Amino acid sequence: MSRVRLVEPLIMIVTILRWFVLATITGAIVGTGTSLFLKGLYFFTDKSSNLPLWITMCLLPIGGLLNGLILYFGYRNGSKDKKDSVIAAVHEQSGLMPYKTIAIKPIAAIITLASGGSAGKEGPCSHIGGTLASWFGHIIRLSPELQKRLVACGVSAGFASVFGTPIAGAIYGIEVLTIGRIRHDFIFPAVIAGVTSFEVSKLWGITYDYYPIHLSEQFSNSLFIKILLIGMICGLISWLLIELFELVRRTFSMIQQRLHIWPPMMPFIGGLILSILLLIIPADYFGLSLPIMDDALSGERVSYLGWFWKIILVSITLGSGFYGGIVTPQFVIGAIVGNVLAHVLGINPVLGAAVGMVSVVASASNTPIAAVFMGFELFGSFTGIYVVGACITAYITIGHRSVYPDQMVAYPKSLWMRLVPGIALENEKIHVSYTLLKKIKRWQSHQKRIYVYLKRPKKL
Protein backbone atom coordinates (compact mmCIF):
# COMPACT_ATOMS: atom_id res chain seq x y z
CA MET A 1 0.00 0.00 0.00
CA SER A 2 2.82 2.42 0.88
CA ARG A 3 4.50 1.63 -2.45
CA VAL A 4 1.28 2.51 -4.30
CA ARG A 5 1.08 5.84 -2.43
CA LEU A 6 4.59 6.70 -3.58
CA VAL A 7 4.00 5.68 -7.19
CA GLU A 8 0.53 7.18 -7.63
CA PRO A 9 1.59 10.87 -7.87
CA LEU A 10 4.12 9.94 -10.56
CA ILE A 11 1.42 8.08 -12.51
CA MET A 12 -0.89 11.09 -12.25
CA ILE A 13 1.81 13.47 -13.51
CA VAL A 14 2.57 11.18 -16.46
CA THR A 15 -1.19 11.03 -17.15
CA ILE A 16 -1.35 14.82 -17.21
CA LEU A 17 1.62 15.03 -19.57
CA ARG A 18 0.20 12.42 -21.91
CA TRP A 19 -3.18 14.10 -22.12
CA PHE A 20 -1.59 17.53 -22.44
CA VAL A 21 0.21 16.37 -25.60
CA LEU A 22 -2.75 14.45 -27.06
CA ALA A 23 -5.30 17.18 -26.27
CA THR A 24 -3.06 19.97 -27.58
CA ILE A 25 -2.55 18.21 -30.90
CA THR A 26 -6.27 17.43 -31.10
CA GLY A 27 -7.21 21.03 -30.30
CA ALA A 28 -4.83 22.37 -32.96
CA ILE A 29 -6.24 20.01 -35.61
CA VAL A 30 -9.85 20.74 -34.69
CA GLY A 31 -9.25 24.49 -34.42
CA THR A 32 -7.87 24.49 -37.95
CA GLY A 33 -10.75 22.39 -39.29
CA THR A 34 -13.49 24.49 -37.67
CA SER A 35 -11.80 27.75 -38.70
CA LEU A 36 -11.74 26.70 -42.35
CA PHE A 37 -15.43 25.77 -42.08
CA LEU A 38 -16.34 29.08 -40.41
CA LYS A 39 -14.46 31.07 -43.05
CA GLY A 40 -16.35 29.25 -45.80
CA LEU A 41 -19.65 29.69 -43.96
CA TYR A 42 -19.15 33.45 -43.43
CA PHE A 43 -18.11 33.91 -47.06
CA PHE A 44 -21.26 32.31 -48.47
CA THR A 45 -23.68 33.76 -45.90
CA ASP A 46 -22.29 37.26 -46.50
CA LYS A 47 -22.87 36.82 -50.23
CA SER A 48 -26.48 35.73 -49.72
CA SER A 49 -27.45 38.03 -46.84
CA ASN A 50 -28.73 41.01 -48.87
CA LEU A 51 -30.35 39.23 -51.80
CA PRO A 52 -33.82 40.29 -53.02
CA LEU A 53 -36.77 38.52 -51.43
CA TRP A 54 -37.71 36.54 -54.53
CA ILE A 55 -34.18 35.14 -54.87
CA THR A 56 -34.18 33.97 -51.25
CA MET A 57 -37.58 32.36 -51.83
CA CYS A 58 -36.04 30.43 -54.72
CA LEU A 59 -32.90 29.53 -52.80
CA LEU A 60 -34.73 27.89 -49.88
CA PRO A 61 -36.23 24.93 -51.83
CA ILE A 62 -33.04 24.62 -53.90
CA GLY A 63 -31.01 24.49 -50.68
CA GLY A 64 -33.41 21.89 -49.31
CA LEU A 65 -33.05 19.70 -52.40
CA LEU A 66 -29.24 19.97 -52.29
CA ASN A 67 -29.29 19.04 -48.60
CA GLY A 68 -31.47 16.04 -49.33
CA LEU A 69 -29.26 14.84 -52.18
CA ILE A 70 -26.00 15.28 -50.26
CA LEU A 71 -27.24 13.51 -47.13
CA TYR A 72 -29.02 10.75 -49.05
CA PHE A 73 -26.23 9.80 -51.43
CA GLY A 74 -23.49 10.62 -48.93
CA TYR A 75 -24.72 8.04 -46.41
CA ARG A 76 -26.49 5.60 -48.71
CA ASN A 77 -23.57 3.17 -48.95
CA GLY A 78 -22.24 3.85 -45.48
CA SER A 79 -21.95 1.45 -42.58
CA LYS A 80 -25.36 0.76 -41.05
CA ASP A 81 -23.93 0.10 -37.60
CA LYS A 82 -21.81 3.25 -37.35
CA LYS A 83 -23.75 6.45 -36.59
CA ASP A 84 -22.37 9.92 -37.25
CA SER A 85 -23.53 11.13 -33.82
CA VAL A 86 -20.68 12.17 -31.53
CA ILE A 87 -22.74 11.09 -28.52
CA ALA A 88 -23.23 7.62 -30.01
CA ALA A 89 -19.53 7.51 -30.94
CA VAL A 90 -18.58 7.86 -27.26
CA HIS A 91 -21.28 5.65 -25.75
CA GLU A 92 -21.71 2.92 -28.37
CA GLN A 93 -18.91 2.97 -30.97
CA SER A 94 -15.70 3.08 -28.92
CA GLY A 95 -14.90 6.55 -30.24
CA LEU A 96 -15.21 5.67 -33.93
CA MET A 97 -17.05 7.89 -36.43
CA PRO A 98 -17.60 7.59 -40.20
CA TYR A 99 -14.93 9.79 -41.76
CA LYS A 100 -17.18 10.89 -44.63
CA THR A 101 -19.07 13.00 -42.05
CA ILE A 102 -16.33 15.63 -42.17
CA ALA A 103 -17.13 16.30 -45.83
CA ILE A 104 -20.90 15.82 -45.82
CA LYS A 105 -22.13 17.73 -42.77
CA PRO A 106 -20.13 21.00 -43.17
CA ILE A 107 -21.13 21.34 -46.83
CA ALA A 108 -24.78 20.64 -46.02
CA ALA A 109 -24.71 23.21 -43.19
CA ILE A 110 -23.23 25.91 -45.43
CA ILE A 111 -25.95 25.27 -48.01
CA THR A 112 -28.64 25.40 -45.31
CA LEU A 113 -27.52 28.71 -43.82
CA ALA A 114 -26.55 30.37 -47.11
CA SER A 115 -29.95 29.56 -48.62
CA GLY A 116 -31.80 31.04 -45.63
CA GLY A 117 -32.54 27.96 -43.55
CA SER A 118 -32.93 28.64 -39.83
CA ALA A 119 -30.27 26.62 -38.03
CA GLY A 120 -26.92 26.95 -36.22
CA LYS A 121 -23.23 26.74 -37.01
CA GLU A 122 -22.06 24.64 -34.06
CA GLY A 123 -23.46 21.28 -35.26
CA PRO A 124 -20.97 20.88 -38.11
CA CYS A 125 -18.18 22.13 -35.83
CA SER A 126 -18.93 19.37 -33.32
CA HIS A 127 -18.97 16.83 -36.16
CA ILE A 128 -15.70 18.23 -37.51
CA GLY A 129 -14.16 18.05 -34.03
CA GLY A 130 -15.40 14.54 -33.27
CA THR A 131 -14.45 13.15 -36.69
CA LEU A 132 -10.96 14.68 -36.74
CA ALA A 133 -10.32 13.46 -33.19
CA SER A 134 -11.55 9.98 -34.14
CA TRP A 135 -9.27 9.97 -37.18
CA PHE A 136 -6.27 11.14 -35.14
CA GLY A 137 -6.88 8.51 -32.46
CA HIS A 138 -7.14 5.81 -35.13
CA ILE A 139 -3.86 6.96 -36.73
CA ILE A 140 -1.90 6.68 -33.48
CA ARG A 141 -3.71 3.43 -32.55
CA LEU A 142 -5.27 4.44 -29.24
CA SER A 143 -7.20 1.95 -27.15
CA PRO A 144 -11.04 2.17 -27.32
CA GLU A 145 -11.23 3.91 -23.93
CA LEU A 146 -8.64 6.54 -24.90
CA GLN A 147 -10.31 6.90 -28.29
CA LYS A 148 -13.63 7.76 -26.62
CA ARG A 149 -11.98 10.44 -24.51
CA LEU A 150 -10.23 11.89 -27.52
CA VAL A 151 -13.52 12.16 -29.43
CA ALA A 152 -15.05 13.98 -26.45
CA CYS A 153 -12.04 16.33 -26.56
CA GLY A 154 -12.67 16.92 -30.25
CA VAL A 155 -16.30 17.85 -29.62
CA SER A 156 -15.22 20.21 -26.82
CA ALA A 157 -12.64 21.80 -29.10
CA GLY A 158 -15.26 22.29 -31.82
CA PHE A 159 -17.67 24.07 -29.49
CA ALA A 160 -14.90 26.20 -27.96
CA SER A 161 -13.79 27.29 -31.42
CA VAL A 162 -17.21 28.21 -32.78
CA PHE A 163 -18.43 30.25 -29.80
CA GLY A 164 -15.17 31.70 -28.48
CA THR A 165 -15.84 30.26 -25.02
CA PRO A 166 -13.02 27.77 -24.36
CA ILE A 167 -14.06 26.67 -20.87
CA ALA A 168 -17.81 26.53 -21.57
CA GLY A 169 -17.13 24.74 -24.86
CA ALA A 170 -14.91 22.21 -23.11
CA ILE A 171 -17.51 21.47 -20.44
CA TYR A 172 -20.34 21.38 -23.01
CA GLY A 173 -18.58 18.70 -25.02
CA ILE A 174 -18.55 16.30 -22.07
CA GLU A 175 -21.67 17.40 -20.18
CA VAL A 176 -23.84 16.87 -23.25
CA LEU A 177 -22.99 13.15 -23.28
CA THR A 178 -25.07 12.19 -20.22
CA ILE A 179 -27.84 13.89 -18.25
CA GLY A 180 -27.03 14.03 -14.56
CA ARG A 181 -23.38 13.00 -14.69
CA ILE A 182 -20.06 14.42 -15.87
CA ARG A 183 -16.97 12.30 -16.48
CA HIS A 184 -14.39 14.16 -14.41
CA ASP A 185 -11.59 12.22 -16.05
CA PHE A 186 -12.59 13.91 -19.34
CA ILE A 187 -12.34 17.46 -17.99
CA PHE A 188 -8.58 18.08 -18.14
CA PRO A 189 -8.05 16.96 -21.75
CA ALA A 190 -11.29 18.68 -22.81
CA VAL A 191 -10.16 22.01 -21.34
CA ILE A 192 -6.70 21.73 -22.95
CA ALA A 193 -8.25 20.86 -26.32
CA GLY A 194 -10.81 23.67 -25.99
CA VAL A 195 -8.27 26.35 -25.11
CA THR A 196 -5.91 25.20 -27.86
CA SER A 197 -8.68 25.15 -30.47
CA PHE A 198 -9.82 28.63 -29.41
CA GLU A 199 -6.31 30.07 -29.69
CA VAL A 200 -5.67 28.38 -33.05
CA SER A 201 -8.95 29.77 -34.40
CA LYS A 202 -7.90 33.27 -33.38
CA LEU A 203 -4.63 32.74 -35.27
CA TRP A 204 -6.72 31.86 -38.32
CA GLY A 205 -8.48 35.22 -37.99
CA ILE A 206 -11.78 34.07 -36.45
CA THR A 207 -13.26 36.83 -34.28
CA TYR A 208 -15.76 36.56 -31.44
CA ASP A 209 -18.31 38.85 -29.80
CA TYR A 210 -18.58 39.33 -26.04
CA TYR A 211 -21.19 41.25 -24.06
CA PRO A 212 -19.77 42.37 -20.69
CA ILE A 213 -22.48 43.45 -18.25
CA HIS A 214 -21.76 45.71 -15.27
CA LEU A 215 -24.44 45.76 -12.60
CA SER A 216 -24.29 48.80 -10.32
CA GLU A 217 -26.68 47.57 -7.64
CA GLN A 218 -25.92 45.02 -4.94
CA PHE A 219 -27.56 41.61 -4.84
CA SER A 220 -31.34 41.93 -4.73
CA ASN A 221 -33.70 39.25 -3.44
CA SER A 222 -36.58 40.49 -5.57
CA LEU A 223 -34.39 40.62 -8.68
CA PHE A 224 -33.14 37.08 -8.00
CA ILE A 225 -36.73 35.78 -7.73
CA LYS A 226 -37.60 37.47 -11.05
CA ILE A 227 -34.51 35.87 -12.63
CA LEU A 228 -35.64 32.46 -11.36
CA LEU A 229 -39.01 33.12 -12.99
CA ILE A 230 -37.24 33.92 -16.27
CA GLY A 231 -35.32 30.65 -15.94
CA MET A 232 -38.53 28.71 -15.37
CA ILE A 233 -40.23 30.25 -18.41
CA CYS A 234 -37.12 29.61 -20.51
CA GLY A 235 -37.35 25.96 -19.49
CA LEU A 236 -40.94 25.88 -20.73
CA ILE A 237 -39.95 27.63 -23.98
CA SER A 238 -37.24 24.99 -24.46
CA TRP A 239 -39.87 22.31 -23.87
CA LEU A 240 -41.98 23.88 -26.63
CA LEU A 241 -38.97 24.00 -28.98
CA ILE A 242 -38.27 20.28 -28.52
CA GLU A 243 -41.90 19.19 -28.73
CA LEU A 244 -42.63 21.25 -31.83
CA PHE A 245 -39.43 20.12 -33.53
CA GLU A 246 -40.29 16.46 -32.84
CA LEU A 247 -43.85 16.99 -34.08
CA VAL A 248 -42.64 18.50 -37.36
CA ARG A 249 -40.01 15.77 -37.81
CA ARG A 250 -42.55 12.99 -37.25
CA THR A 251 -45.05 14.67 -39.57
CA PHE A 252 -42.55 14.93 -42.41
CA SER A 253 -41.47 11.32 -41.81
CA MET A 254 -45.08 10.10 -41.85
CA ILE A 255 -45.85 11.99 -45.07
CA GLN A 256 -42.72 10.61 -46.73
CA GLN A 257 -43.60 7.01 -45.79
CA ARG A 258 -47.31 7.13 -46.60
CA LEU A 259 -46.92 8.91 -49.95
CA HIS A 260 -43.68 7.08 -50.82
CA ILE A 261 -41.87 10.34 -51.53
CA TRP A 262 -38.19 10.10 -52.46
CA PRO A 263 -36.33 11.12 -49.24
CA PRO A 264 -34.25 13.96 -50.81
CA MET A 265 -37.52 15.69 -51.75
CA MET A 266 -38.59 16.19 -48.12
CA PRO A 267 -36.22 19.11 -47.36
CA PHE A 268 -37.23 20.51 -50.77
CA ILE A 269 -40.84 20.56 -49.53
CA GLY A 270 -39.62 22.10 -46.27
CA GLY A 271 -37.87 24.79 -48.31
CA LEU A 272 -41.12 25.55 -50.16
CA ILE A 273 -42.94 25.98 -46.84
CA LEU A 274 -40.17 28.27 -45.57
CA SER A 275 -40.45 30.32 -48.77
CA ILE A 276 -44.15 30.89 -48.10
CA LEU A 277 -43.42 31.81 -44.47
CA LEU A 278 -40.90 34.36 -45.73
CA LEU A 279 -43.91 36.41 -46.87
CA ILE A 280 -45.26 36.41 -43.29
CA ILE A 281 -42.25 36.25 -40.95
CA PRO A 282 -39.54 38.94 -41.18
CA ALA A 283 -36.42 37.79 -43.05
CA ASP A 284 -34.25 38.55 -39.98
CA TYR A 285 -35.50 35.35 -38.34
CA PHE A 286 -34.14 33.21 -41.18
CA GLY A 287 -30.53 32.01 -41.20
CA LEU A 288 -28.47 32.49 -38.04
CA SER A 289 -30.48 35.56 -36.85
CA LEU A 290 -27.49 36.88 -34.91
CA PRO A 291 -28.43 40.58 -35.41
CA ILE A 292 -31.69 39.95 -33.52
CA MET A 293 -29.74 38.33 -30.70
CA ASP A 294 -27.37 41.31 -30.61
CA ASP A 295 -30.34 43.71 -30.40
CA ALA A 296 -31.81 41.74 -27.50
CA LEU A 297 -28.48 41.66 -25.66
CA SER A 298 -28.00 45.41 -26.14
CA GLY A 299 -31.32 46.06 -24.37
CA GLU A 300 -33.34 47.16 -27.39
CA ARG A 301 -36.98 46.15 -27.57
CA VAL A 302 -37.56 43.10 -29.75
CA SER A 303 -40.75 41.50 -31.03
CA TYR A 304 -42.78 39.81 -28.31
CA LEU A 305 -43.38 36.89 -30.68
CA GLY A 306 -39.85 36.75 -32.06
CA TRP A 307 -38.96 33.65 -30.07
CA PHE A 308 -42.04 31.84 -31.45
CA TRP A 309 -41.18 32.72 -35.07
CA LYS A 310 -37.68 31.36 -34.53
CA ILE A 311 -38.99 28.11 -33.06
CA ILE A 312 -41.34 27.65 -36.03
CA LEU A 313 -38.57 28.25 -38.58
CA VAL A 314 -36.02 26.04 -36.81
CA SER A 315 -38.55 23.21 -36.46
CA ILE A 316 -39.46 23.27 -40.15
CA THR A 317 -35.84 23.68 -41.30
CA LEU A 318 -34.37 20.83 -39.28
CA GLY A 319 -37.53 18.73 -39.06
CA SER A 320 -37.91 18.56 -42.84
CA GLY A 321 -34.36 17.33 -43.38
CA PHE A 322 -32.10 20.36 -43.72
CA TYR A 323 -28.86 19.93 -41.77
CA GLY A 324 -27.55 22.46 -39.28
CA GLY A 325 -26.82 23.07 -35.62
CA ILE A 326 -29.45 23.72 -32.97
CA VAL A 327 -27.48 25.57 -30.27
CA THR A 328 -27.21 28.94 -32.04
CA PRO A 329 -31.03 29.03 -32.40
CA GLN A 330 -31.20 28.39 -28.65
CA PHE A 331 -29.07 31.51 -28.14
CA VAL A 332 -31.41 33.61 -30.27
CA ILE A 333 -34.61 32.23 -28.73
CA GLY A 334 -33.29 32.64 -25.18
CA ALA A 335 -32.06 36.19 -25.71
CA ILE A 336 -35.43 37.24 -27.16
CA VAL A 337 -37.42 35.58 -24.38
CA GLY A 338 -35.20 37.06 -21.66
CA ASN A 339 -35.39 40.54 -23.19
CA VAL A 340 -39.20 40.41 -23.50
CA LEU A 341 -39.67 39.11 -19.94
CA ALA A 342 -37.28 41.71 -18.57
CA HIS A 343 -39.38 44.51 -20.01
CA VAL A 344 -42.53 42.90 -18.58
CA LEU A 345 -40.97 42.40 -15.12
CA GLY A 346 -39.35 45.83 -15.06
CA ILE A 347 -35.71 44.72 -14.81
CA ASN A 348 -32.61 45.45 -16.86
CA PRO A 349 -33.35 44.02 -20.34
CA VAL A 350 -29.65 43.41 -20.97
CA LEU A 351 -29.47 41.16 -17.90
CA GLY A 352 -32.76 39.51 -18.84
CA ALA A 353 -31.54 38.70 -22.35
CA ALA A 354 -28.24 37.36 -20.99
CA VAL A 355 -29.80 34.97 -18.47
CA GLY A 356 -32.48 33.97 -20.97
CA MET A 357 -29.87 33.08 -23.56
CA VAL A 358 -27.89 30.74 -21.32
CA SER A 359 -31.02 29.35 -19.64
CA VAL A 360 -32.40 27.99 -22.90
CA VAL A 361 -29.02 26.35 -23.61
CA ALA A 362 -28.96 24.89 -20.09
CA SER A 363 -32.43 23.37 -20.48
CA ALA A 364 -32.74 22.41 -24.17
CA SER A 365 -29.27 20.79 -24.21
CA ASN A 366 -29.29 19.63 -20.57
CA THR A 367 -25.95 21.37 -19.96
CA PRO A 368 -26.45 23.71 -16.96
CA ILE A 369 -22.79 23.79 -15.88
CA ALA A 370 -21.55 24.61 -19.38
CA ALA A 371 -24.25 27.28 -19.64
CA VAL A 372 -23.09 28.86 -16.37
CA PHE A 373 -19.49 29.00 -17.62
CA MET A 374 -20.78 30.44 -20.88
CA GLY A 375 -22.50 33.19 -18.92
CA PHE A 376 -19.24 34.05 -17.15
CA GLU A 377 -17.23 34.04 -20.38
CA LEU A 378 -19.71 36.03 -22.47
CA PHE A 379 -21.12 38.45 -19.90
CA GLY A 380 -18.56 38.69 -17.10
CA SER A 381 -18.63 37.76 -13.43
CA PHE A 382 -21.14 40.44 -12.38
CA THR A 383 -24.02 38.28 -13.61
CA GLY A 384 -22.73 35.20 -11.78
CA ILE A 385 -25.38 34.41 -9.17
CA TYR A 386 -28.25 35.32 -11.50
CA VAL A 387 -26.91 33.15 -14.32
CA VAL A 388 -26.49 30.21 -11.95
CA GLY A 389 -30.03 30.54 -10.57
CA ALA A 390 -31.66 30.87 -14.00
CA CYS A 391 -29.71 28.01 -15.60
CA ILE A 392 -30.39 25.49 -12.85
CA THR A 393 -34.07 26.44 -12.70
CA ALA A 394 -34.48 26.08 -16.48
CA TYR A 395 -32.61 22.77 -16.48
CA ILE A 396 -34.99 21.27 -13.90
CA THR A 397 -38.12 22.78 -15.45
CA ILE A 398 -37.71 21.14 -18.85
CA GLY A 399 -37.69 17.66 -17.35
CA HIS A 400 -36.35 14.66 -19.25
CA ARG A 401 -36.25 15.82 -22.86
CA SER A 402 -33.49 17.19 -25.05
CA VAL A 403 -32.61 18.48 -28.50
CA TYR A 404 -30.23 15.49 -28.54
CA PRO A 405 -32.45 12.36 -28.35
CA ASP A 406 -29.42 10.04 -28.04
CA GLN A 407 -28.34 11.75 -24.81
CA MET A 408 -28.09 9.18 -22.03
CA VAL A 409 -29.67 9.60 -18.59
CA ALA A 410 -27.73 8.78 -15.44
CA TYR A 411 -30.11 10.12 -12.76
CA PRO A 412 -33.66 11.52 -12.80
CA LYS A 413 -34.09 15.23 -12.12
CA SER A 414 -36.76 14.59 -9.49
CA LEU A 415 -37.35 11.93 -6.83
CA TRP A 416 -40.91 11.77 -8.12
CA MET A 417 -39.72 10.40 -11.48
CA ARG A 418 -38.46 6.88 -12.20
CA LEU A 419 -36.24 5.73 -15.07
CA VAL A 420 -33.62 3.13 -15.95
CA PRO A 421 -30.10 4.68 -15.84
CA GLY A 422 -27.79 4.36 -18.83
CA ILE A 423 -30.43 4.43 -21.57
CA ALA A 424 -30.70 7.04 -24.33
CA LEU A 425 -33.61 9.47 -24.01
CA GLU A 426 -35.16 8.27 -27.28
CA ASN A 427 -35.42 4.75 -25.80
CA GLU A 428 -36.05 5.73 -22.20
CA LYS A 429 -39.34 4.96 -20.45
CA ILE A 430 -39.86 7.57 -17.75
CA HIS A 431 -42.57 7.04 -15.13
CA VAL A 432 -44.05 8.98 -12.27
CA SER A 433 -42.96 7.39 -8.99
CA TYR A 434 -45.33 5.14 -7.05
CA THR A 435 -45.00 7.42 -4.00
CA LEU A 436 -46.32 10.43 -5.90
CA LEU A 437 -49.13 8.40 -7.45
CA LYS A 438 -50.21 7.30 -3.95
CA LYS A 439 -50.20 10.92 -2.76
CA ILE A 440 -52.29 11.98 -5.75
CA LYS A 441 -54.76 9.15 -5.21
CA ARG A 442 -55.02 9.99 -1.50
CA TRP A 443 -55.64 13.66 -2.33
CA GLN A 444 -58.33 12.71 -4.87
CA SER A 445 -60.06 10.50 -2.30
CA HIS A 446 -59.93 13.32 0.22
CA GLN A 447 -61.45 15.76 -2.31
CA LYS A 448 -64.18 13.25 -3.10
CA ARG A 449 -65.08 12.90 0.59
CA ILE A 450 -65.29 16.67 0.94
CA TYR A 451 -67.51 16.88 -2.15
CA VAL A 452 -69.86 14.16 -0.80
CA TYR A 453 -70.02 15.90 2.59
CA LEU A 454 -70.87 19.28 1.05
CA LYS A 455 -73.59 17.71 -1.13
CA ARG A 456 -75.24 15.97 1.82
CA PRO A 457 -78.60 17.48 2.75
CA LYS A 458 -78.37 19.66 5.85
CA LYS A 459 -80.62 18.94 8.87
CA LEU A 460 -82.74 21.82 10.10
Image (cartoon, rainbow, N blue to C red):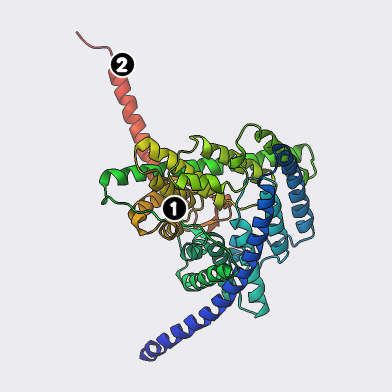
Q: Which structural element holds mark 2?
A: helix
| In front: label 1 or label 2 | 1
Quadrant location of the N terminus in the rendered image: bottom left
Residue name at image x 74 percent, y 43 percent:
59
Could you tell me which residue is drawn at 44 percent across and 53 percent down? Answer: 412
Task: Inspect this view and state whether residue 458 appears.
Answer: yes
Which residue is at the front of the view, 367 or 177?
367
The amino acid type found where label 1 is placed reads Pro
- The C terminus - image quarter: top left
Give residue 116's position: percent from left, percent from top: 67, 45
Report the side of 38 relative to 366 (left or right): right
The type of residue carrying mark 2 is Lys
Q: Quadrant of residue 10?
A: bottom left
Answer few, some or many: residues within 10 Å of disc 1's Cα (few below 14, many 20 plus, some between 14 and 19).
Answer: some
Q: Is residue 211 above or below residue 250?
A: below
Give percent across and percent down for residue 455: 31, 16
Q: Which mark is residue 455?
A: 2
Direction from residue 330 to residue 447 in the image, left or right: left
Find residue 11 and report its image quarter.
bottom left
Task: Give the image location of residue 277, x and y in percent.
Answer: 65, 34
Mark linked to residue 199: none
Mark 2, Cα crowd under 10 Å, few <14 / some 14-19 / many 20+, is few
Question: How far apart are the two marked residues, 1 and 2, measured between alpha carbons?
Answer: 42 Å
Contact between marks 1 and 2 (CB within 8 A): the answer is no
Q: Nearer the viewer, residue 312 or 275?
A: 275
> 233 and 281: which one is in front?
281
Badge 1 element:
loop
Would residue 450 appear left or right of 372 to someone viewing this image? left
Residue designated by label 1: 412
**Residue 182 at what x, y percent from top left?**
46, 64
